[in-house]
C-alpha cells in the first residue's frame, strides 16, 4: 500500500467513524436532536460512550499518524518496509475501532500497538534514509 493510499484510507476510516457516531446519536436521541440549538446533557449508553471514545481516539491518532504518513509521502519514501507499515497502520486503526465498538478491552491493545508502532517505523525509516 502506498503512503498516499494509506492517508486516503485513514481519512475514509475517520469519516466512517464520524458517521457512525452521528447516525447512532440520531437513532438513539431522535432526528430533531441534531438540529436543536438548546441541547441539554444526555444520558449515553455504554455503546454510545464507546463509539464516542473510539472516534476521539481516532482523532488523537491522526495527530501523530497523518504527519508521519504525509511527510514520508512528500519525501518520496518507498520500499516494502514503509509500504507494509502503512498497511499495518491503517489495518491496526480499523481493527482498533471495531474492537473498541465491541467493548473487548484486552484484544484492542495489540491493534492499537499495530497502528502506533508502524507509524514509529515509518518515522524511523524517514529519518534514517536522510530524506529530510
Image (spheres, helix red, strand yellow):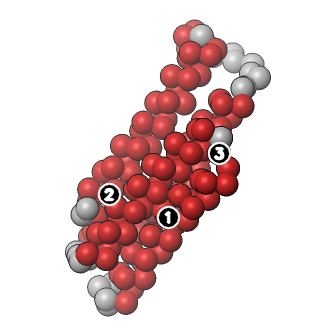
Q: Nearer the viewer, mark 2 or mark 3?
A: 3
Instruction: Specify the quadrant that holds the C terminus.
Output: bottom left
Q: Which residue is mark 3?
A: 104
- Residue at 39% across / 75% down in the picture? 122
Q: Secondary structure at mark 3?
A: loop
Q: Nearer the viewer, residue 57 or 80?
A: 80
**Structural crowding at the residue carrying mark 2, measured as other residues with C-alpha within 10 Å and reported as few (<14), some (14–19) or many (≥20):** many
Q: Secondary structure at mark 1?
A: helix
Identify the mark at residue 6; answer none if there is no mark.
2
Q: Secondary structure at mark 2?
A: helix
Tell me residue 50's x, y (percent).
65, 38
Mark 2 and mark 3 lie on one chain; the one further toward the N terminus is 2
Identify the mark at residue 114; answer none if there is no mark.
1
Residue 25: tell me if it is visible. yes
- Residue at 42% across / 36% down in the picture? 16
**Structural crowding at the residue carrying mark 1, measured as other residues with C-alpha within 10 Å and reported as few (<14), some (14–19) or many (≥20):** many
Q: Nearer the viewer, mark 1 or mark 2?
A: 1
Tell me residue 117's x, y (percent).
50, 71
Q: Nearer the viewer, residue 16 or 67?
A: 16
Residue 70: tell me if it is visible. no
Distance from the alpha carbon under mark 1 to that under mark 3: 16 Å
Q: Is residue 127 above or below residue 122?
A: below
Mark 1 and mark 2 lie on one chain; the one further toward the N terminus is 2
Disc 1 vs disc 3: Cβ atoms closer than 8 Å? no
Q: Residue 85 sits in which quadrant?
A: bottom left
Disc 2 vs disc 3: Cβ atoms closer than 8 Å? no
Tell me residue 15's x, y (percent).
42, 38
Q: Is residue 80 above or below residue 69?
A: below
Identify the mark at residue 60; answer none if there is no mark.
none
Amino acid at each position: 500500500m502506498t503512503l498516499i493510499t494509506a492517508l486516503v484510507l485513514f481519512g475514509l476510516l475517520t469519516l466512517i467513524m464520524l458517521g457512525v457516531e452521528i447516525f447512532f446519536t440520531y437513532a438513539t436521541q431522535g432526528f430533531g436532536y441534531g438540529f436543536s440549538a438548546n441541547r441539554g446533557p444526555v444520558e449515553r449508553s455504554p455503546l454510545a460512550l464507546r463509539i464516542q471514545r473510539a472516534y476521539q481516539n481516532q482523532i488523537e491518532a491522526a495527530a501523530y499518524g497523518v504527519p508521519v504518513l504525509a511527510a514520508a509521502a512528500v519525501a518520496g519514501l518507498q520500499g516494502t518496509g514503509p509500504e507494509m507499515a502503512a498497511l499495518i497502520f491503517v489495518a491496526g486503526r480499523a481493527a482498533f475501532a471495531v474492537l473498541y465498538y465491541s467493548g473487548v478491552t484486552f484484544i484492542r491493545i495489540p491493534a492499537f500497538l499495530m497502528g502506533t508502532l508502524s507509524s514509529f517505523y515509518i518515522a524511523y525509516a524517514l529519518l534514517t534514509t536522510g530524506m529530510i
